[in-house]
Image (tube, rainbow, N blue to C red):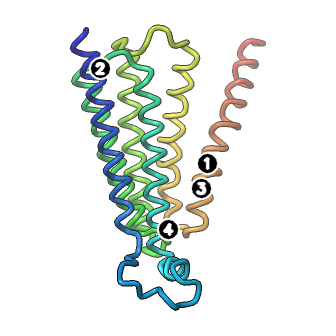
Amino acid sequence: MRAQSRALRRLEVFLDIVYGLIAVHMLTYLPSARDMSWVGQHLGLLGAMVHNDREIWRVLMGTGITAIAWYVGSKRLSQLRRTDFVNTTLTLIQTLFVCFFVYFAICDPMLVGGPSSRALQCGSLALASLAGQLAWRYARWRRLVDTDVPPAHLDDIGERGRTETITAALNTPLAWAGPLVWTLGWFVIPLVLTQAVPRLRRTKRGETAEA
């Protein structure tokens, strides 16, 4: 039991280092200004940044995605009291696909590379979410979670994980519908899943209770 608790701490530290290295690496995409070529130009250094808007967008997207992935992962791990080989492996697989997602996202930050880059983003995120969902289900099944956490909160974490997985999977075909439709899908699909689906479930439960 104590060894599994130490393993959880090591896993958390390892993931912190991985996401930290990714975030630092994103800064290397900033346009070089050391040659001072921006001196005397319109808007100076700000102008140099504006002319390299693709690289700036790549940095913002990469660091943003990394920050979100780190927050979601750390919040889920914080609900555990220990880990084992299977849970650790699934968590590392999830992190691997998150890295793929970040890579595909920064390769085509302006969404001009065609449907393949958008589909790869969806696919890698769907696999990452699926691995995280399996890790969470396994952790609850093996009673790796903190016993002080309310069951309703644990259910909520699992529900959010399912929403992420389904959203990424359903948004994959929209990669061929164009960048605008694909981008809107990231907002519309989870909205439908979190609003319409629970209402439909409550309606069916009410009809069953009346019957």
Residue kind at label 4, given as amino acid type: Trp
**Sequence order check, earlier mark of 4 and 2:** 4
Q: Which mark is residue 189?
A: 1
The image position of residue 61, as x and y in percent, is 48, 60
Q: Looking at the image, which is closer to me, 205 or 51?
A: 51
Instruction: Assess whether mark 3 and mark 4 are in contact (beta carbons under 8 angstroms).
Output: no
Q: How far apart are the alpha carbons under marks 3 and 1?
A: 6 Å
Q: Residue at 37% of width from left, 68% of height from top?
A: 29
Q: Residue furthest right?
A: 210
Amino acid tagged 2: Thr
In the rendered structure, are the residues bearing label 3 and label 1 in contact, judged by CB atoms less than 8 Å apart?
yes
Q: Is residue 103 above or below residue 210?
A: below
Task: Using the numbered discs, state the Cα–Cα distance from disc 4 to disc 2 in whole angstroms.
Answer: 37 Å
* Residue at mark 2: 83
Helix, strand or loop status at disc 4: helix
Instruction: Work out how far the residue at label 4 is from the one at label 3, CA to CA, in angstroms.
Output: 20 Å
Tell whether 183 sits left or right of 138. right
**Residue type at the position of mark 1:** Ile
Which residue is the site of mark 3? 185
The residue nearer to you, when weighing 131 against 41, is: 41
SS at mark 3 in the image:
helix
Q: Quadrant of residue 1?
A: top left
